[in-house]
Image (cartoon, rainbow, N blue to C red):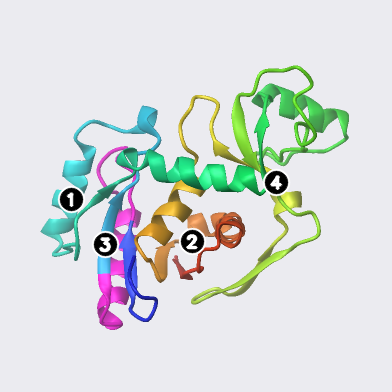
Amino acid sequence: MSERGGYIGRFAPSPTGPLHAGSLVAALASWLDARAHGGQWLVRIEDVDTPRCVPGADRVILEQLAACGLHPDGPVVYQSQRGHLYQAALDALIAQRIAYPCACTRQDIALALVASGHIRQRHGELVYPGTCRHGLKGRHARAWRFMTDSGVEVRWTDRRLGDQAQNVVRDVGDFILKRADGLWAYQLAVVVDDAAQGITHIVRGEDLADNTARQLMLQQALGYEPPQYLHTP
């Protein structure tokens, strides 16, 4: 991990296929921001969601970046090789009693929300109602979740969007850390990797902005220094 005084940025694509135009814009924006601050720019291949990964896509992505003159300032990191770090972080959260096993399927969650009178917006988040917070009641654990604090609204300042806030309990609920299929969830993996690589500034697409509050909660719980965020159009 680097000293916090220096700028370290990153571009972290998922190898689900070649980079599209929007991803290349985000890559260029993060590279330019690093260069403008005299900092380092790293590339991390986020291949933790293996069923969605396309063989050879990582090589294509790196070739696309190189063709645009975007060369990382250090070795390329692959999430699929870092499971031990994610497990250590999960163990730390379990020890704090803010991570717990969950037996619910998506259908279970949907039925629980209907029973409680919750109306899900079309294409909206399937907000977890906390069914397994107080035990599995004899059911088999399928996944692990992070226990959100109902009294906290997460606030932060985005370098482009300005002051931001999200009520994670209302908008998301207790979110997944390790999936039912045994794969690590994006939220945990990205937070652990950013901390391990000493990332100080994150420049990424605005479509990822709604992940920020969850990541800030995890950073605080794990004792990580939060990076600065800038979400591009």
Labels 3 and 4 touching (C-beta < 8 A): no
Q: Which mark is residue 147?
A: 4
Judged from the image, the secondary structure of the residue bearing numbered disc 1 is helix
Type of amino acid under label 4: Met
Residue, disc 1: 62
Report if residue 231 lies within the magenta region: no
Labels 1 and 4 touching (C-beta < 8 A): no
Q: Nearer the viewer, residue 151 or 30?
A: 151
Nearest to N terminus: mark 1 or mark 2:
1
Nearest to N terminus: mark 3 or mark 1:
3
Horizontal and vertical percent for residue 28?
A: 27, 66
Q: CA distance from mark 1 to mark 4?
A: 37 Å
Residue, disc 2: 206
**Region in magenta:** 12-40
Residue shown at the point (72%, 38%) measured from the top left: 128
Nearest to N terminus: mark 1 or mark 4:
1
Residue, disc 3: 42
Q: CA distance from mark 4 to mark 2?
A: 26 Å
Nearest to N terminus: mark 2 or mark 3:
3
Type of amino acid under label 3: Leu
